[in-house]
C-alpha cells in the first residue's frame, strides 16, 4: 500500500471515534491485526484496518461481547458461508438484551415502589434509607 493511503494511529482513532489506547488494546488481544511500521517505527494503518475497526466499534455499540465480535469477524472472512452462525450469535445477543431489559424493568418497579413510599419527612423516617439498610436481626 502506498504511504499516502496509510493512516497513523491518531488519524485512525479520529476516523473511527476510538481512543488510541483502545486501538492498541484491540491489537494486543488480536481483534485488530498488527499494522505495518514506518521507517521511523510508527504504526501505519491500511484501509482494511479502518474497515475492521469500524466493524468492531459498531458491534461494541450494539453491545456484542469481544468473544462474539471475534466470532463475527472470523465468520465475515468466509463470504460464501451460510449466515446461520451469524444469525445465531445475533439472536443469542438479542436474548441477552431482552433479559437485561426485563431486569432493568424489575429494578425500575422496585425503585418506583420505594420512592412512592416517601413521606417527605426526616431522614430518620425515610423508607428508602430503611429499605437499603441491613435488617436488624
Image (cartoon, helix red, strand yellow):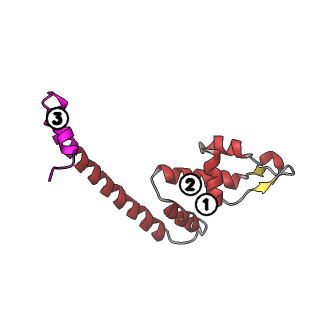
Q: What is the total number of numbered labels drawn onto the structure image?
A: 3
Task: Choose mark 3 or mark 2, whichever is in front.
Answer: 3
Contact? badges 2 and 1 (CB < 8 Å): yes
Residue 109 in sight in this render: no
Question: Badge 3 is on which residue?
Answer: 126
Q: Crowdedness of circle 3 by 10 Å Cα count: few (<14), some, many (20+)?
A: some
Is 119 within the magenta?
A: yes
Q: Sequence order check: which comes first, mark 2 or mark 1?
A: 1
Extent of the magenta region: 110-137
Q: Where is residue 62 in the image (x, y as percent from the top left)?
A: 45, 51
Question: Badge 2 is on which residue?
Answer: 56
In this orientation, which residue lies closer to the viewer: 84 or 30?
30
Q: Sequence order check: which comes first, mark 3 or mark 2?
A: 2
Q: Could you say which disc has been placed on residue 108 in the image?
A: none
Q: Where is residue 98 in the image (x, y as percent from the top left)?
A: 32, 56
In this orientation, which residue lies closer to the viewer: 131 or 86?
131
Task: Choose mark 2 or mark 1, whichever is in front.
Answer: 1
Q: Sequence order check: which comes first, mark 1 or mark 3?
A: 1
Q: Could you say which disc has been placed on residue 31 in the image?
A: 1
Residue plotted at (60% across, 69% down): 78
Q: Crowdedness of circle 1 by 10 Å Cα count: few (<14), some, many (20+)?
A: some
Residue plotted at (66% across, 50% down): 50
Query: From the viewer's perspective, is 103 left or right of 125?
Result: right
Amino acid at each position: 500500500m502506498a504511504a499516502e493511503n496509510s493512516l497513523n494511529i491518531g488519524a485512525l482513532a479520529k476516523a473511527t471515534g476510538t481512543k488510541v489506547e483502545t486501538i492498541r488494546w484491540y491489537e494486543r488481544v488480536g481483534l485488530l491485526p498488527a499494522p505495518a511500521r514506518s521507517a521511523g517505527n510508527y504504526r501505519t494503518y491500511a484501509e482494511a484496518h479502518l474497515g475492521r475497526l469500524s466493524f468492531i466499534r459498531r458491534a461494541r455499540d450494539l453491545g456484542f461481547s469481544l468473544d462474539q465480535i471475534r466470532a463475527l469477524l472470523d465468520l465475515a472472512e468466509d463470504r460464501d458461508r451460510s449466515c446461520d452462525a451469524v444469525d445465531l450469535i445475533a439472536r443469542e445477543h438479542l436474548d441477552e438484551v431482552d433479559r437485561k431489559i426485563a431486569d432493568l424493568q424489575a429494578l425500575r418497579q422496585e425503585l418506583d415502589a420505594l420512592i412512592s413510599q416517601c413521606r417527605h419527612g426526616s431522614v430518620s423516617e425515610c423508607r428508602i434509607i430503611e429499605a437499603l439498610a441491613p435488617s436488624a436481626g
